[in-house]
Amino acid sequence: MRETDTESDASGRALRPRAVDLDRFFRPASVAVIGASDTPDRPNTGITKQLRAWSERVGARMYPVNPGRDEVDGLPCYPYLASIPADPDADPIDLAVVLLADPAAVLPQLIEAKVKFAVAFASGFAETGERGREAQRRLESLVAEAPTGLRLLGPNTNLNAFERFREDLSGPAIALITQSGHQGRPLFALQELGIRLSHWAPTGNEADLEVADFVQWFADQPEIGAMAAYIEGIKDGRAFLLAADHAARRGVPVVAVKVGRTDEGARMAQSHTGKLTGADDVVDAAFRQFGVIRVEGLDELQDTAALLARAKPPRAPGVVVYSISGGTGAHLADMASAAGLTLPRLSQAKQDELHQWIPEYLSVANPVDNGGHPVGDWRGRRILDAILDDPDVGVLICPITGPFPPMSDKLAQDLVEVAETTDKLVCVIWGSPVGTEAAYRETLLGSSRVAVFRTFGNCVKAVSAYLRHHEFVRSYRSPFDEAPREACAGKAKAERLLRGGEKLSEFAAKQLLRSYGIRVPREQLVTSAAGAVRAAGVVGYPVVLKGSAPDVAHKTELGLVKVGLTSASQVREAFRELTENARAGGIARLDGVLVCQMVEAGVEMVVGVTDDAVFGPTVTVGMGGVFVEVMRDTTVLVPPFGPGDVRDALARLRCRPLLDGVRGLPPMDVDALVDVVLRVQRMALELGDRLAELDINPLVVLERGKGVVALDALAVCR
């Protein structure tokens, strides 16, 4: 069996990524092509020729393998892998490319020969249905049980890893990862615009090697400035998070298109939390927490990855828009501000300096409108130098909506030249739909220091991602370093409460919360009116009475809650009404009636746990109360996460001002709320194999210093 990293958290999940050294995959010393051919017009013939050309480029020896050939394309051909003459001075075969319809048939040979990597091109596996999934499971088992450490790319992959990359381009490169080869074609074409690509990993069906393995390895390659990924599905959520964490620690940006925004197979959740959280919300949360930059289209993927790969870290967060037209500047400034970019107003001294070359009647506060004429002579360069000299400015964006030679030619040249003199980011939007102009094709694209875009939207999104990425990296602290390794003391008690296949009553669910140190009201469970009166005396008036049963989620709607009871007579009458309402509502049996402490008013929140098929237990936090499903003001956190992640999540809520104190209300105990979310995370991790869903609603946040109280809870066992 494959050796694995034994370091794990309290849930038993890995805290370190698996280490796959892909150097011999991308630069092997020897390549065996199984099923090689040189028969004209056969698909394998073209593949064999491409692999031979690639092997020669990377300095590898290629061995054709085919029992029906003595020679392929002028090279000696061997009937079986084992018949390749052993070289005492060489390692076993680094890479075997399998061109057969049934790669599983030759995997035992590869394992026996101690081949390091294999590629299976064949389709007809998990993408085709249950029979294909079974065939893929066979492949997975063979690889997983290989004692020699064989790693497999595919099946259902292609030749993208063996493309010819341009070697005349310099600077940091983009590494490309795609689960669909065709979707990577636009990024591969970036080389024609002077942007360097170094690797392409087409992961296919991911029977073994997956996106996470390539993210992990690419982050350590010094020539890679950014990764661009097209992802259809994430095979292992924890492996992906560990790889993204490694990239974040290294400061290497990962930009990704992740398809599947809609959740066609939504689960029938029983809790509020399950109904509020879709699979794509979880992907968004995972990406956000670990710094993966999610974009929507392949054009955004190209532009954002190219900018992040090549641009140096920002010197300042301020963005200045510089144009020859007030309308153009205002349009772009609107878009930039809406995207959250900071457009600082230039100081009066800086504006006076700019007015030396720009007419006084034009605004130069930011956006800077030069009126057009200054770009055609010596003044254009002076203006650019002055703007970039401002310490509050880190990014200059110059939109050129269409060519107007010779002035646009001079402007483009000035932008290229000034970019060579500064570490600050210079962006140009060339809006001409033609794109054949010399100012664009030769001047702007000929510079590695200017970031060139074709649309306002892509420029704004890329600059926003660039600034957010560097801010994220500066403050990033890996949550894996602080993840709990040992279970807490309350786990054993919690496990006794969770009996498989049942929903817990409110009373039992609150005991579950108590076992993890989450505060609940003083309360007693009673089965008679007399018992309710005695309990009210112990709990202390005023009290709340609630019907308690495992199958009751919406007690208020069923008339199973009575609040503000201040006397024994009110408690007796409330007990009678609750039991009658339960019978009328079709509830066969109440566990009893809860007599609860009346908690003072605060902000009602919801905190819950649901299970995601990819990432495992997730935690949801947001606005709670009876309108939780109407307001839908919640956000998701993917374990592991720390206090900073919780605070960031709370900041995204529309209800966040309520916690700060509004309209005369005092500030609430946000620290206590953060603590509860962290305790729920621990519960989710430690009880993940037993706890399917948890819903704390409402969780009342009291005034600062007074803590939080879980007034109600629902728990669903596996």
Image (tube, rainbow, N blue to C red):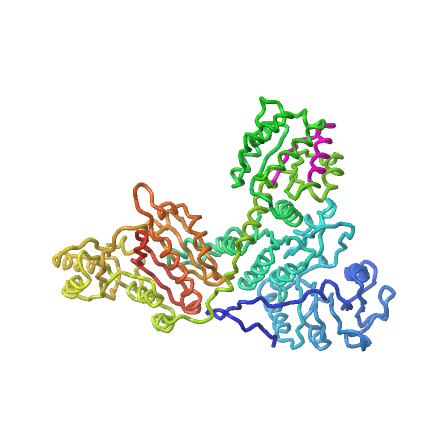
Q: Name, please, the residue furthest toward the front.
A: 349
Residue 696 shown in magenta = no
Query: Whole-percent x and y of residue 330?
Result: 56, 30
Residue 244 appears in view: yes
* x and y, in percent, of residue 645 in the image: 46, 55
How many callouts does the rendering have? 0
In magenta segment, residue 415: yes
Q: Work out whether 538 lies above or below 262.
A: below
Q: Is the C terminus in the top left, top right, bottom left or bottom right quadrant?
A: bottom left
Seen in the image, is 338 located left or right of residue 270?
right
Percent x, y for residue 72? 84, 66
The one nearer the camera, 379 or 369, is 379
Instruction: From the viewer's side, name the closer residue of 227 and 609.
Output: 227
Residue in the image at 74% along x and 46% along y: 192
Q: Quadrant of residue 54?
A: bottom right
Q: Residue at x 14, y 65 (%)?
A: 530
Residue 42 visible somewhere in the drawing? no
Establish if 539 lies above or below 319. below
The picture quadrant where one finds residue 433 is: top right
Q: Is residue 113 above or below residue 252?
A: below
In this picture, is 233 found above or below 24?
above
Name the residue nearer the viewer: 701 or 418.
Answer: 418
In percent of width and height, residue 450 lies at 68, 41
| Observer-nearest of 648 and 338 | 648
Q: Is residue 44 left or right of residue 285?
A: right
* Region in magenta: 395-419
The furthest residue to the right: 74
The image quadrant where one finds the N terminus is bottom right
